[in-house]
Image: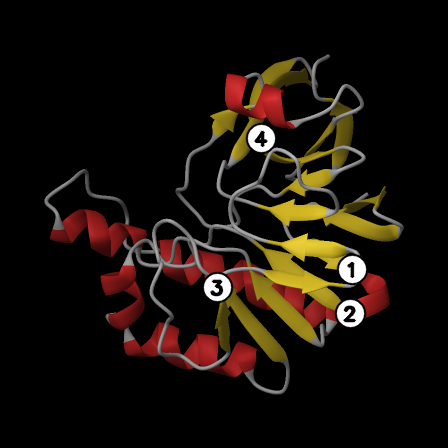
Amino acid sequence: MNEHPFPLAGTVLTARASGALWWEAERLLAVSDLHLGKADRLARRAGALLPPYDTHETLTRLAAEIEALAPRTVICLGDSFDDDDAARDLPEPATDRLTALMAGRRWIWISGNHDPAPPDLGGTALAELALGPLRFRHIAEREAEGEVSGHYHPKMRRRLGGQSVARPCFLVDCRRAILPAFGAYTGGLATHAPVLDALMGADALAILTGPKALALPMRA
């Protein structure tokens, strides 16, 4: 299956195999950590060079989710751009494509640690958003309830089909959901990392992305 539904704070949310989160009742799509412009930022800082296709690939995947689900609202949960310069210097074709995706729907930019300044691309920039029983923010807060966040780029390694594979994953329990990074070339933090172990309850699931959404116990 390309999705896995789960309950949170009286709602039913769906983890998509793409790494996007779908709230059917609100027709709301949430994605986190797009890191648009990462290759350009690394080139500016004379870091390791990546193929300059990350923004195109990420927007192509986002466009596919929007076409499939026709959301009324899209929430980008922070680190949508790799830094503030990346937001300002987004190439014109990428800006045009992003503008087209935003047209006709509510679009919310949650500020992240990489992109604290509001992007000058339309939409609404917020530090966080409360909607019904849920609160959308970039970085999880330990005592929060009904929280949807990103930031950590969780990733789980498991043997699947006789091979050891590492896949980005959602982490979900009865209090929160942490989304995987949606952007290309974003790396990840192992699900057994202490910071993630401290945030997630004993009931936590890791929902792996990839060819299909696969739910496993986080601590299996």
Q: Earlier in the sequence, mark 4 or mark 3?
A: 3
Say which of 142 and 12 sits in front.
142
Q: Indicate whether 169 appears above or below 68.
A: above
Q: Amino acid at mark 1?
A: Trp
Q: Is residue 70 visible?
A: yes
Q: Which residue is mark 1?
A: 23
Q: Which residue is mark 4?
A: 167
Which residue is painted at 64% across and 39% down in the image? 210
Q: Which residue is mark 2?
A: 27
In the picture, the quarter occupied by the C terminus is: top right
Of badges 3 and 2, nearer the viewer stands: 2
Q: Earlier in the sequence, mark 2 or mark 4?
A: 2
* 64 to the left or right of 153: right
Report how far apart the C-alphas of labels 1 and 4 lie in the structure: 23 Å
Report how far apart the C-alphas of labels 2 and 1 lie in the structure: 6 Å
Q: Amino acid at mark 3?
A: Leu
Looking at the rendered structure, the secondary structure element under dot 2 is loop
